[in-house]
Image (tube, rainbow, N blue to C red):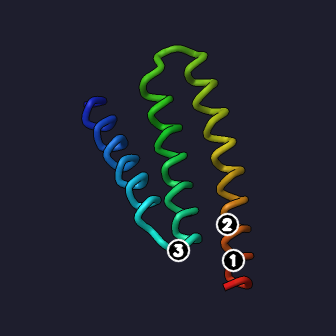
Protein backbone atom coordinates (compact mmCIF):
# COMPACT_ATOMS: atom_id res chain seq x y z
CA UNK A 1 0.00 0.00 0.00
CA UNK A 2 2.78 2.44 0.89
CA UNK A 3 4.50 1.74 -2.43
CA UNK A 4 1.42 2.91 -4.32
CA UNK A 5 1.25 6.09 -2.24
CA UNK A 6 4.94 6.80 -2.83
CA UNK A 7 4.55 6.23 -6.56
CA UNK A 8 1.54 8.55 -6.75
CA UNK A 9 3.31 11.30 -4.79
CA UNK A 10 6.44 10.83 -6.90
CA UNK A 11 4.37 11.09 -10.09
CA UNK A 12 2.74 14.29 -8.85
CA UNK A 13 6.18 15.69 -8.01
CA UNK A 14 7.48 14.88 -11.50
CA UNK A 15 4.37 16.38 -13.08
CA UNK A 16 4.79 19.59 -11.09
CA UNK A 17 8.47 19.77 -12.04
CA UNK A 18 7.57 19.50 -15.72
CA UNK A 19 4.84 22.11 -15.37
CA UNK A 20 7.24 24.52 -13.65
CA UNK A 21 9.51 24.44 -16.69
CA UNK A 22 6.71 24.53 -19.27
CA UNK A 23 4.55 27.26 -17.73
CA UNK A 24 5.06 30.85 -18.85
CA UNK A 25 3.10 32.57 -16.08
CA UNK A 26 5.23 33.39 -13.06
CA UNK A 27 2.26 33.12 -10.71
CA UNK A 28 1.43 29.59 -11.85
CA UNK A 29 5.07 28.57 -11.63
CA UNK A 30 5.04 29.61 -7.99
CA UNK A 31 1.92 27.55 -7.33
CA UNK A 32 3.48 24.47 -8.92
CA UNK A 33 6.63 25.05 -6.89
CA UNK A 34 4.52 25.12 -3.73
CA UNK A 35 2.89 21.81 -4.65
CA UNK A 36 6.31 20.32 -5.39
CA UNK A 37 7.60 21.31 -1.96
CA UNK A 38 4.63 19.60 -0.27
CA UNK A 39 5.33 16.46 -2.30
CA UNK A 40 8.94 16.47 -1.14
CA UNK A 41 7.81 16.84 2.46
CA UNK A 42 5.48 13.86 2.11
CA UNK A 43 8.18 11.72 0.50
CA UNK A 44 10.63 12.53 3.31
CA UNK A 45 8.04 11.45 5.86
CA UNK A 46 7.32 8.21 4.00
CA UNK A 47 10.90 7.17 3.21
CA UNK A 48 12.66 7.83 6.50
CA UNK A 49 11.37 5.40 9.11
CA UNK A 50 12.80 6.94 12.24
CA UNK A 51 11.90 9.70 14.68
CA UNK A 52 14.58 11.91 13.13
CA UNK A 53 12.94 11.43 9.73
CA UNK A 54 9.67 12.60 11.23
CA UNK A 55 11.35 15.67 12.67
CA UNK A 56 12.94 16.45 9.31
CA UNK A 57 9.60 16.01 7.53
CA UNK A 58 7.83 18.26 10.04
CA UNK A 59 10.53 20.91 9.73
CA UNK A 60 10.40 20.77 5.94
CA UNK A 61 6.59 20.96 6.06
CA UNK A 62 6.68 24.05 8.28
CA UNK A 63 9.20 25.72 5.99
CA UNK A 64 7.04 24.79 2.99
CA UNK A 65 4.05 26.38 4.65
CA UNK A 66 5.99 29.57 5.29
CA UNK A 67 7.15 29.59 1.68
CA UNK A 68 3.54 29.07 0.57
CA UNK A 69 2.60 32.23 2.39
CA UNK A 70 5.46 34.02 0.65
CA UNK A 71 4.27 32.63 -2.68
CA UNK A 72 0.73 33.86 -2.05
CA UNK A 73 2.07 37.30 -1.21
CA UNK A 74 4.25 37.32 -4.33
CA UNK A 75 1.31 36.31 -6.52
CA UNK A 76 -0.68 39.21 -5.13
CA UNK A 77 2.21 41.57 -5.86
CA UNK A 78 2.66 40.27 -9.43
CA UNK A 79 -0.98 41.08 -10.14
CA UNK A 80 -0.14 44.72 -9.59
CA UNK A 81 2.94 44.51 -11.84
CA UNK A 82 1.27 42.67 -14.73
Looking at the rendered structure, the secondary structure element under dot 3 is loop
Q: Residue at x 52, y 74 (%)?
A: 25
Question: Mark 2 Cα within 10 Å, few/some/many (few <14, many 20+)?
Answer: some
Q: CA distance from mark 3 to mark 1?
A: 10 Å
Image x and y of residue 38, in percent: 52, 46
Mark earlier in primary sequence (3, 1): 3
Image x and y of residue 72, in percent: 67, 66
Question: Mark 1 Cα within 10 Å, few/some/many (few <14, many 20+)?
Answer: few
Image x and y of residue 39, in percent: 46, 44
The residue pinned by badge 1 equals 78
Which residue occupies the foreground of this view, 59 or 71? Answer: 71
Mark earlier in primary sequence (2, 3): 3
Residue 8 image-quadrant placement? top left
- Report the number of discs: 3
The residue pinned by badge 3 equals 25
Q: Residue at x 31, y 38 (%)?
A: 5
In the image, taking residue 10 as reference, residue 36 lies left or right, namely right
Marking on residue 72: 2
In the image, taking residue 36 as reference, residue 78 lies left or right, namely right
Looking at the rendered structure, the secondary structure element under dot 2 is helix
Which residue occupies the foreground of this view, 19 or 10? Answer: 19
Amino acid sequence: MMDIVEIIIGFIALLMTARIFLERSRARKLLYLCCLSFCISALIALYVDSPMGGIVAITYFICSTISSNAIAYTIEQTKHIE
